[in-house]
Image (cartoon, helix red, strand yellow):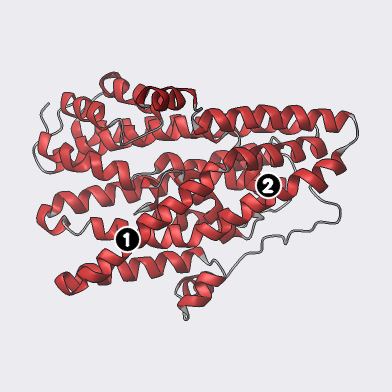
Amino acid sequence: MNEVNRMNNKKKLSLPVQILIALVLGIAVGLVCYFMDAGEFTTNYLKPFGDIFVNLLKFIVVPVVLLSMIDGIISMGDMKKVGAVGWKTVAYFLCTTAVACVIGLVFANIFNNAGLFPTLSLEEGAVWDKATSANFMETLVGIFPSNMWSAFSASNMLQVIVIALFFGGGIMAAGEKGRLCKDIVSSFYAVIEQVMNFIISLSPIGVFTMMAWVVATQGANILGSLVLVLLCAYIGYVVHAVLIYSMSAKVFAGLSPIWFFKEASAAMIFAFTSTSSAATLPVSKECADALGADSEISSFVLPLGSTINMDGTAIYQCVATIFLASCAGVQLSVGQMITIVVTATLASIGTAGVSGAGMIMLAMVLTAMGIDVNLIMIIYGVDRLFDMGRTCLNVTGDISCAICVSHWEGKHRK
């Protein structure tokens, strides 16, 4: 019996492979329908199944963001014990995430303004509201909810994040009296993770049906656009790694960028192929220590970074949001781009540790921007390729942070 189970496990395809197969099949079916002028078939009989998957994504976004952020904040409750190291680590991650968002937006807008991102006609007569400039003070006031349930029902993600920050901080401040709430949050979050894992397991169906519909209605041109958006994201990844991570190691710890990347390369390659910051931790630890990070500090910074550091995801969100906004014919205002930066930076506190966080976070940002979440399926088929680069970038940032914090604490070994 055990031998049969092992054979079944070996035969079972991993989710990324299933998604890749669904992507290829969706493109093939879409091209056939496009050249046979049968786009209406995909609209009537395939797209509805994709819509069901997207509806499930919309359903899970708010509870995942709320509970993962509260759980992430609660998990930092021991920071009082580690003092300056903990807060310097969190400050480093939040600052670099904000910079990552700016870098992602800059390159995405360069590509978009150059006409490299398409505007699609997804449905006849479909109209999306154009972005308008918002008054800063009105935007600031709107971040803070007057009714918690309204924020949930309207999927106002900035308000949901603020609610999570307040509840997470309140549970930490309550100490022993807040233990029951802490346990409830952890229990609910474990349940939501299982629900989310089930929804994510349906990804191949969503990818196949939506990709077939998009290609059948838009033709092969959309495939070239996916290559361009991947290129844009990877340019952002490389620039952020060089300008922010290696230069911060140079400025604060005196390490040359070449030496930094040489010693960190083992962890970067492992992260790129495994797409898991957590699985890369042992290799990251060896690389950070080889670069002179204090062993105790790296033992704290790296696990925390694998949970809350999401610079790669931040770049991905910004590039993908601009790309999908272009597909929908939406021009985002400067105020809305600032909102993207704030949303992604604050959300880095807890959501990065969630399996499938890239797609969940992108759905969150699209909802905050008022962009049709259905568009996410255009890009989700190649999410694995995005994920390889963003995980590699996140791990590089963890190592850089360990080095910088070691220097700030006077414990860096040159």
- Which residue was labeled with disc 1? 187
**Quarter the C terminus occupies:** top left
Q: Quadrant of residue 369?
A: bottom right
199 lies left or right of 375 = left
Secondary structure under badge 2?
helix
Secondary structure under badge 1?
helix
25 lies left or right of 312 = right
- Which residue was labeled with disc 2? 50
Rendered location of residue 277, percent (x, y):
34, 35
Q: CA distance from mark 2 to mark 1?
A: 30 Å
402 lies left or right of 147 = left
Whether 175 is drawn above or below 268: the answer is below
Residue drawn 84% across the image and 33% down it: 33
Residue drawn 66% across the image and 64% down it: 132
Check disc 1: other Cα within 10 Å, few if <14, some if 14-19, many if 20+: some
Check disc 2: other Cα within 10 Å, few if <14, some if 14-19, many if 20+: many
Residue 110 visible here: no
Residue drawn 36% across the image and 37% down it: 394
The disc placed on residue 123 is none
Front residue of 319 and 351: 351
Front residue of 163 and 195: 195
Reading the chain from its start, which is encountered first: label 2 or label 1? 2
Front residue of 76 and 229: 76
Q: Report the amino acid beneath label 2.
A: Gly
Rendered location of residue 367, percent (x, y):
58, 59
User: Which numbered disc, 2 or 1, marks the residue closer to the eye?
Assistant: 1
Q: Quadrant of residue 391?
A: top left
Residue with the most extreme right position: 37
390 lies left or right of 78 = right
Q: Report the amino acid beneath label 1.
A: Ser
Rendered location of residue 364, percent (x, y):
52, 56
